[in-house]
Image: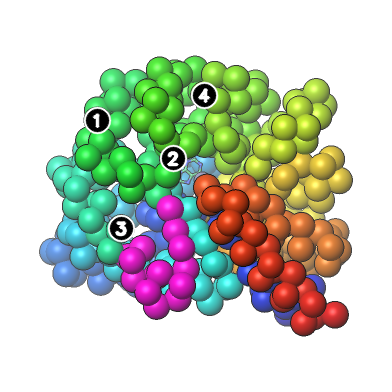
Amino acid sequence: MTDLATFAAGLPKAELHVHIEGTLEPELMFELARRNGVTIPFASVDEVRAAYSFTRLQDFLDIYYRGADVLRTEADFRDLAIAYFDRAAADNVRHAEIFFDPQTHTDRGIPFDTVMAGLLAGMADAEARHGLSSRLILCFLRHLDEEAAFATLKAAEPWIDRIAAVGLDSSEVGNPPAKFERVFGAAALLGLGRVAHAGEEGPPEYVRDALDVLLVDRIDHGNRALEDPVLVTRLAREAITLTVCPLSNLKLCVVDSVDAHPIARMLRAGLRATINSDDPAYFGGYVNDNFAAIADTGMLSRADLITLARNSFLGAFLDDEAITGHLAALDSYVDTQR
Ligand code: HPA
Ligand code: ZN
């Protein structure tokens, strides 16, 4: 590892964009398949990894939803979450806001409550063993309709005080933010935060509409916002957090190479960008692998890396006191590295 990557690895950080179903490593996929008597279309872990070759978002989504089929019981969701949190803690993640896709599970007959109980057990374990705090973000699958999203929000109501926000993921192009205006409005009335994937493959208008129609607190990805200078100025002025995922962008061909990644341009434009892993089991790396890939390009300074970690706390669904505490820990780390 380069000096910059080592420095970045040690930074206390928050992860704000990780799909818990996307942390399912092939080894655990096989173990859960065996435990639950589920057949998977792969003969070995190597065969699974070899299948992870994508040219666009939809290639990935097809295989990602199939992989999730091994998740059946509360213990499965707990073990999935524990495996992610253990890995995140090793990367000095102090706070994680994890997406989950309830419709991927309820559509297979897995009760919403099973998913919630398992994830919450994993979150309690992370707090107890690593002091790692976490929040849940319930994502609506945007390829499904508004009615299905409303049914999911209804199923979530008994758990509403354990959910920080709603999000929007899955196939972006052709499923604009406006499709979910009413359900995001209903979520807001329930006191939930709001985030949405926008500008990963979709146009800058989807980023603007996520802000204006869904009233989001953060934009997930946001890469294509850079095509619209007026939008960039607005995102900077309003200090909207962008949860950027470099290795995901590389694997899904959103960028041609890590060297071509716009993270440096985002920071120079004054955008509140953060670094995240998205679906680490599928895209070849956890949050520090993403920091290392970007650090190794040489396009960022030490100060930029500190800014990225700082932004991750500033953009979190945490109260001011918690944020202040994390920023103080970040400053202490930096002081030890001088
Ligand atoms: N984009 C959209 N939907 C997703 C992603 C992503 O990167 N990961 C999991 N679901
Ligand atoms: Zn994502």
Distance between the alpha carbons at the discs numbered 3 and 2: 15 Å
Hey, which quadrant is residue 77 in on the image? bottom left
Front residue of 198 and 120:
120
Q: Earlier in the sequence, mark 4 or mark 3?
A: 3
Front residue of 170 and 274:
274
Q: Earlier in the sequence, mark 4 or mark 1?
A: 1
The answer to whether 137 is drawn above or below residue 35 in the figure is: above
Distance between the alpha carbons at the discs numbered 4 and 1: 18 Å
Magenta-highlighted residues: 122-135
Q: Is residue 183 left or right of residue 12?
A: left
Q: Is residue 46 shown to the viewer in this render?
A: no
The chief SS type of the magenta part is helix
Residue position for label 2: 165
Dot in front, 3 or 2: 2
Which residue does the image show at 25% across and 59% down from the upper left?
A: 118
Ligand 2 closer than 8 Å to the CB at disc 2?
no
Tell me which amino acid carries mark 2.
Answer: Ala
Residue position for label 3: 119
The answer to whether 334 is drawn above or below residue 80 in the figure is: below
Q: Earlier in the sequence, mark 4 or mark 2?
A: 2
Which residue does the image show at 68% across and 63% down from the upper left?
A: 327
Which label is found at residue 214? Answer: 4
Tell me which amino acid carries mark 1.
Answer: Lys
Residue position for label 1: 154
